[in-house]
Image (tube, rainbow, N blue to C red):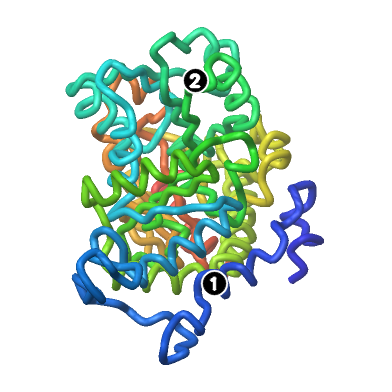
Amino acid sequence: MDFKNSDCAAGFQQEFRSFATDAIHVGQEPEQWNSMAVVPPISLSTTFKQYGPGKHAGFEYSRSGNPTRNCLEKAVAALDGGKYCVALASGLAATVTITHMLKSGDGILCMNDVYGGTNRYFQRVAAEIGYDVSFADFTNLEVLKAALKPNTKMLWIETPTNPTMKIVDIQACSDVAHEYSKNIIVVVDNTFMSAYFQRPLALGADMCMYSATKYMNGHTDVVMGLISVSREDLYEQLKFLQNALGGVPSPFDCYMCNRGLKTLHLRMKQHFKNALAVAEFLEADPRVEKVIFPGLPSHPQHELMKKQCTGCPGMITFYIKGKLEHATTFLSNLKLFALAESLGGYESLAEHPAIMTHASVPENERMELGISDTLIRLSVGLEDEEDIIADLAQALSAAHAET
């Protein structure tokens, strides 16, 4: 399939040049190893022999730096169009590390619709230890401008948002924040999009972070976080905190994620193709109240999505007609889809945000955001399109057996 000319990619931005080549080759040079290994080896050693006191070959202790981790970080930096990357033990470890760049009393302004774990950390941890945390709807620039304060030091963007799939204009929000204060660090959680579909650093953001557990690794077998930057001053701070806080991933996990990157471009194209087919099927089904997928023209920010992205991931949110019992019956009757949290793997997953991933978000906030009892989130995988749709169809029939 020529992705640039395919129907699903029509109107989106052009693919990033040499993306697949960079994913396969940057940071993987065989010449860096005495063995000339084509695949970077897993360096499990926790410590490294020195030529003399303080005279080492680039590595001292594996928390401070590891050859396998270096290979991953170089590849990710290239894919994000950045200069530097640091890998952490999880997406939340990345969030914590970034937050530690601030001091007590500094303001963090976060998009109001975000991953439940991000919301929980900011409200129940960061706010409790002295950070001034507030939330606002960044899809409205006037609301964003009104929410900025003299002590705001960080803007936390998630786009598309989890789980209601709102699209935030990264360039516009970055411009607003930096115009207000050049000292505000704009962070974009790019987990839903992956580096293949969106490059926040090219859109004015200062940092691009991921739960690499999802699409970047893509195989549901690694928990990891990643942060990419272009500014050297930010990198030096992050590198210090990576070592000082110690939230580093294992060399084996770095190897696995590095391997996952090699097929990222292929996986994301198929995720998009399958998700668009599923979204169109659901939108036409009378048992579905509403489908939220940025790749559909019906999405209110479809044009913005096309303006800042090269395509859409496999994430779909929809409201099933009925009540909670219809949602739970639907989810319980899925056979190909696994009822499970997380997303971005090769397998299709389904979940109930109000009960599962966003249960930690206060109920009044969930209702305000539209996270109701009939909201269902799908992570559309790489299975055959007709099998995915057939499973959804039979589960909808089970949920609405009376119709």
In the picture shown, does residue 29 fall above or below 157?
below
Tags 1 and 2 touching, CB below 8 Å? no
Q: Which residue in the structure is indicated by mark 1?
A: 263
Query: Who's the residue at 44% across and 30% down the image?
Result: 156
Does residue 402 appear anywhere in the picture? no
Q: Front-most of 402 and 29?
A: 29
SS at badge 2 = loop
Q: Quadrant of residue 50?
A: bottom left
**355 left or right of 371 in image:** left
Q: Quadrant of residue 139?
A: top right
In the picture shown, does residue 34 fall above or below 105?
below
Estimate the x, y position of residue 27 in percent, counting from the top left: 51, 70
How far is the residue under mark 1 from the one under mark 2? 34 Å
In the picture shown, does residue 319 fall above or below 12?
above
Mark 2: which amino acid? Asp
Q: Front-most of 221 and 181?
A: 181
Q: Front-most of 192 and 400?
A: 192
Query: Who's the residue at 42% across and 25% down the image?
Result: 154
Q: Which residue in the structure is indicated by mark 2?
A: 137
